[in-house]
Image: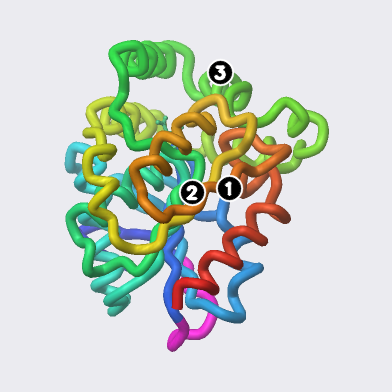
Amino acid sequence: MIINNLSVSYTDAGGKQLPVIIFIHGFPFNKSMWNLQVESLKNDFRLITYDIRGHGSSDAGNEVCSIELFVIDLISLMDALKIKNAILCGLSMGGYIALNAIEKYKERFDALILCDTQCIADTFEAKEKRAKAIEEIRKSGLEKYADESIKNLFASESFTTRLNEIANVREMIVNTSEQSICSTLLALSVRKETCHMLSEIAVPVLIMVGNEDKITPPAAARFMQERLGGSVLKITDHAGHLSNLENPAEFNVQLKMFVKSVY
Ligand code: MLT
């Protein structure tokens, strides 16, 4: 589908008349990371997954990447699909996009699921790390970047129990273009914080995080929950930063219980 002069790859599963859940993937992955969630919810919801520009099979476009631009893409996709309202479920960068989207377009969202994400902006050290990563990628390519990333993405036990998932995630990273990874790293490093607006979110929110998430740890989830009155926090065992892939059984139970309580 063409939106904002950009070819965007998406999937649309479940019944067209059912309540909609839109899934937003993390960086630098793609929509296939939600396959198991789509499978588990397709009898009760309409489920949209899509590739953020520059990821998966979506075009990168020529504009400078930013979380704000990713939000415009999301709203344009909803408009093109004639989706007025939806539940948003975002993991990590997907969560950053979801929080920015609800800040700007609160009437379009009925509930929020924030997975392995945070509301703070990058610290000076985090920005430096991203700048170094860009330098390294330009010098040594994506294979090394993927190997380094994998070490932080998964819980320690996943390295023996989730070899297929790790291989798939590695594929997702190396199949993303160097240019898109670098421009998204820059977009992430200049993103603004969203903590100050959490108390204004009036829809139900579920926060989920892997108990071994090293990138956006449980403390970051608790920090958000304290500012989100009435939100629910679930810490997923046997999982790191990619809790929906590392422990889909527990993740899906929590997800299903929450989305069924929304309507
Ligand atoms: C992600 O999984 O989307 C990234 O870890 C987000 C980030 O680097 O801040």
Q: Is residue 125 above or below residue 107?
A: above
Q: Is mark 3 on a helix, strand or loop?
A: helix
Q: Residue at horizontal 55%, vertical 41%?
A: 209
Q: Name the mark on residue 207.
A: 2
- Could you tell me the amino acid type at mark 3? Lys
The Cα atoms of the two marked residues, 3 and 2, are separated by 32 Å
- Could you tell me the amino acid type at mark 1? Lys
Q: In this view, does 54 lie above or below 182?
A: below
Q: What element carries label 2?
A: strand
Q: Is the magenta stretch mostly helix, strand or loop?
A: loop
Read off the residue under disc 1. Answer: 234
Q: Is mark 1 on a helix, strand or loop?
A: strand
Q: Residue at horizontal 51%, vertical 21%?
A: 145
Residue behind label 3 places its C-beta within 8 angstroms of ligand 1 = no
The Cα atoms of the two marked residues, 1 and 3, are separated by 33 Å
Question: Residues at badges 1 and 2 in contact (C-beta under 8 Å)?
Answer: yes
- The numbered mark, 1 or 2, whose residue comes first in the sequence reads 2
Question: Residues at badges 1 and 3 in contact (C-beta under 8 Å)?
Answer: no
Nearest the eye: 95 or 146: 95
Residues rendered magenta in the picture: 11-18
Question: Residues at badges 3 and 2 in contact (C-beta under 8 Å)?
Answer: no
Horizontal and vertical percent position of residue 160: 82, 31
Horizontal and vertical percent position of residue 117: 44, 39
Nearest the eye: 38 or 80: 38
Q: Quadrant of ligand 1?
A: top left
Circle 3 Cα neighbour tier, 10 Å, few/some/many (<14 / 14–19 / ≥20):
few
Horizontal and vertical percent position of residue 151: 62, 22
Read off the residue under disc 3. Answer: 144
Nearest the eye: 220 or 133: 220
Q: In this view, does 57 lie above or below 83?
A: above
